[in-house]
Amino acid sequence: MTVPKKNSILVIDSNIFFIGIDLNIFKEIIYTTPKIIEEIEVDKYRNNNRNILNKIQVAIESKKLIIKEPSIKSLQIVEEKSKVTGDFKALSLADKELIALTLELSISQSQDVILYTNDYSMENLCSELNLKFSPLYKKGIQKQIIFEVYCPHCKKIYQTENLYKECEVCGTKLKRRPRKILNI
Ligand SMILES: [Zn+2]
């Protein structure tokens, strides 16, 4: 876990909230998006999640946690980049919005902005956008991976937007593999 610089801003993904982390361990202001909170609320009748939602509520009231939606413009930048890296299909709208919020805060705020997530595709896209990120309790990626989408049966190569669709030649479900690996 990277120790953030004083006065950093943290952006937190649902997979970090799901750990059940005590938000008070962070000295920094934390941001997330409405969709991330919704993801946790979907399962609110699970005991553990009710606990997590209570912690979130307390953090919102004490102004430690700020819920903010990214602009459409920053979301568009993230969507375009995700097509370049091949992460487009691997990421949900909630994931892309969270990266868009990180991008927006990085531009508008003078502090370091760090996205906390345990999702490799999100980390990969953050590298491409030059955004700082950190995993919790799991080793993050050391390399940035550019993926290509292909048919595992007939080997035809597709645009990355086609991930998980069926091959137009043989009907096999498309997969992705690293095309290029960059050190970061
Ligand atoms: Zn095929």
Image: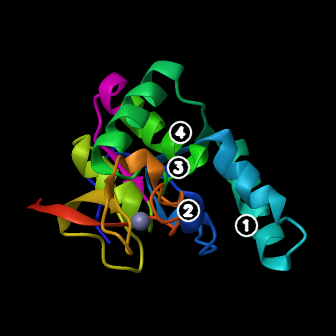
Q: Which residue is mark 4?
A: 97
Q: Which residue is mark 2?
A: 24
Residue type, mark 4 in image? Glu
Considering only order in the chain, which callout, 1 or 2, is on the residue closer to the N terminus? 2
Q: Nearer the viewer, residue 104 or 162?
A: 162
| Magenta residues (range) | 105-116
For the residue labelled by badge 2, is the local secondary structure a helix, a strand or a loop? helix
- Where residue 123 sits in the image (x, y, percent)? 34, 58
Q: Which residue is mark 1?
A: 52
- Where residue 178 sits in the image (x, y, percent)? 24, 66
Colour option used: rainbow
**Image mark for residue 120:** none
User: Can residue 151 be seen from the camera position used here?
Assistant: yes
Q: Is residue 174 left or right of residue 157?
A: right
Considering only order in the chain, which callout, 2 or 3, is on the residue closer to the N terminus? 2
Q: How far apart are the alpha carbons under marks 3 and 2?
A: 24 Å
Name the quarter where the C terminus is drawn.
Answer: bottom left
Considering only order in the chain, which callout, 1 or 3, is on the residue closer to the N terminus? 1
For disc 3, the neighbor class at 10 Å (few under 14, some 14 to 19, many from 20) is: many
For disc 2, the neighbor class at 10 Å (few under 14, some 14 to 19, many from 20) is: few
Q: How far apart are the alpha carbons under marks 1 and 4?
A: 21 Å
